[in-house]
């Protein structure tokens, strides 16, 4: 299950999504999320789904990788859908002449919520799959640069966010190693009730936190030993620039977004 968490991984391949400026991808991701939550009927849901599939296709990342990233939250999706089906007031669903506690309104709401969660995961994963941690840091820093005049430590915030995303796969790998080591010593994480399995995970948290703090300290020492300095004095090997592909992607996305918003309020 832990190996199925793919958020934070980067695939260094050549694709139209990889060639986009990280600032363009960050801004379009925010608009994409807004469009996903605005979609409330079959047409708008179909539009945002088509746009998400187009982004996934242009990223050239295998579809199996996206689907594997859904496994860790599959329980959340199913649980949310079940709650909506049974707890939403409305017209009861009849099966074989018997009235069930499920409602048609709940069934529709459950489908919308499940679709939104899936599209959110796919859209967020497309950003990390196609953007290196360094480019992501530069993009966040550039977008936050206007706030530097207000005294906001924009570079530090960008670095913290990018490092957090970058070390998600590392922490997952470390967690998997600790679980295997404890299983070899007789720990049982798979049998018993849900509460028992959660309690079995508690002894794993201490070595995981110790490993995370040790890794963070090693990273800080490595950066200081190389005289790393951020902010205005930092130079970059590859400067990020807007190009024609960014303009084309923005125009196409804004068209999708405008149509989605218009249909949201017209239908």
Image (spheres, rainbow, N blue to C red):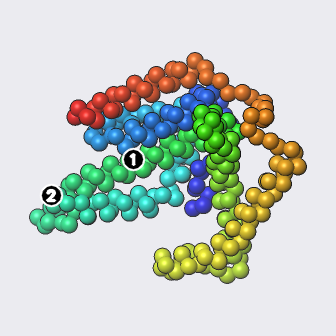
Residue at image coords 27%, 40%: 41
Residue 133 rendering spot, x and y as whole percentages:
68, 42
Question: The residue tagged with tag 2: helix, strand or loop?
Answer: loop
> Where's residue 104, x and y in %?
20, 55
> Can you give x and y, in whole percent of width and height, for residue 216 in the image?
75, 58
> Looking at the image, is 183 positioned above or below residue 69?
below
Task: Name the quarter where the N terminus is drawn.
Answer: bottom right
Q: Dividing the image into 4 quarters, which one contains the C terminus?
A: top left
Q: Earlier in the sequence, mark 1 or mark 2?
A: 2
- Image point (67%, 27%), residue name: 240
The residue pinned by badge 1 equals: 116
The residue labelled by disc 2 is 91
Q: Residue furthest top?
A: 244
Q: Residues within 10 Å of mark 1 (few under 14, many from 20)?
A: many
Does residue 93 appear anywhere in the picture? no
User: In the picture provided, is 254 more to the left or to the right than 161?
Assistant: left
* Quarter of the figure with residue 84: bottom left
Quick check: can you spot residue 89?
Answer: yes
As measured in the structure, the alpha-carbon distance from the residue carrying label 1 to the one carrying label 2 is 23 Å
- Residue 256 falls left or right of residue 19: left
Residue farthest to the left, as pictured: 97
Asked whether 99 or 224 is in front, the reply is: 224
Q: Tell me the SS state at disc 1.
A: helix
Q: Residue at x 59, y 50 (%)?
A: 7
Residue lying farthest to the front in this orientation: 150
Quarter residue 36 falls in: top left
Q: Nearer the viewer, residue 31 or 81?
A: 31
């Amino acid at each position: 299950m832990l190996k199925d968490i793919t958020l934070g991984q980067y695939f260094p391949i050549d694709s139209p999504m990889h060639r986009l400026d990280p600032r363009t991808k960050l801004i379009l991701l925010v608009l994409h999320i807004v469009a996903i939550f605005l979609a409330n009927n079959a047409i708008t849901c179909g539009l945002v789904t088509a746009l998400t599939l187009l982004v996934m296709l242009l990223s050239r990342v295998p579809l199996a990788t996206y689907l594997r990233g859904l496994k860790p939250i599959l329980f959340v999706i199913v649980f949310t859908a079940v709650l909506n089906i049974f707890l939403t007031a409305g017209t009861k669903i009849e099966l074989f002449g018997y009235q069930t506690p499920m409602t048609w309104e709940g069934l529709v709401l459950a489908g919308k919520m499940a679709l939104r969660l899936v599209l959110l995961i796919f859209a967020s994963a497309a950003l990390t799959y196609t953007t290196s941690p360094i480019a992501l840091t530069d993009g966040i820093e550039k977008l936050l640069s206007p706030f530097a005049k207000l005294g906001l430590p924009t570079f530090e915030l960008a670095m913290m966010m990018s490092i957090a995303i970058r070390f998600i796969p590392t922490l997952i790998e470390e967690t998997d190693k600790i679980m295997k080591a404890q299983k070899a010593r007789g720990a049982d994480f798979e049998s018993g009730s849900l509460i028992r399995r959660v309690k079995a995970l508690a002894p794993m948290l201490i070595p995981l936190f110790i490993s995370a703090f040790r890794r963070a300290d090693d990273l800080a020492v490595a950066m200081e030993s190389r005289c790393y300095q951020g902010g205005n004095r930092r130079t970059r090997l590859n400067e990020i620039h807007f190009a024609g592909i960014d303009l084309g992607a923005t125009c196409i996305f804004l068209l999708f977004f405008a149509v989605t918003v218009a249909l949201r309020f017209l239908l």
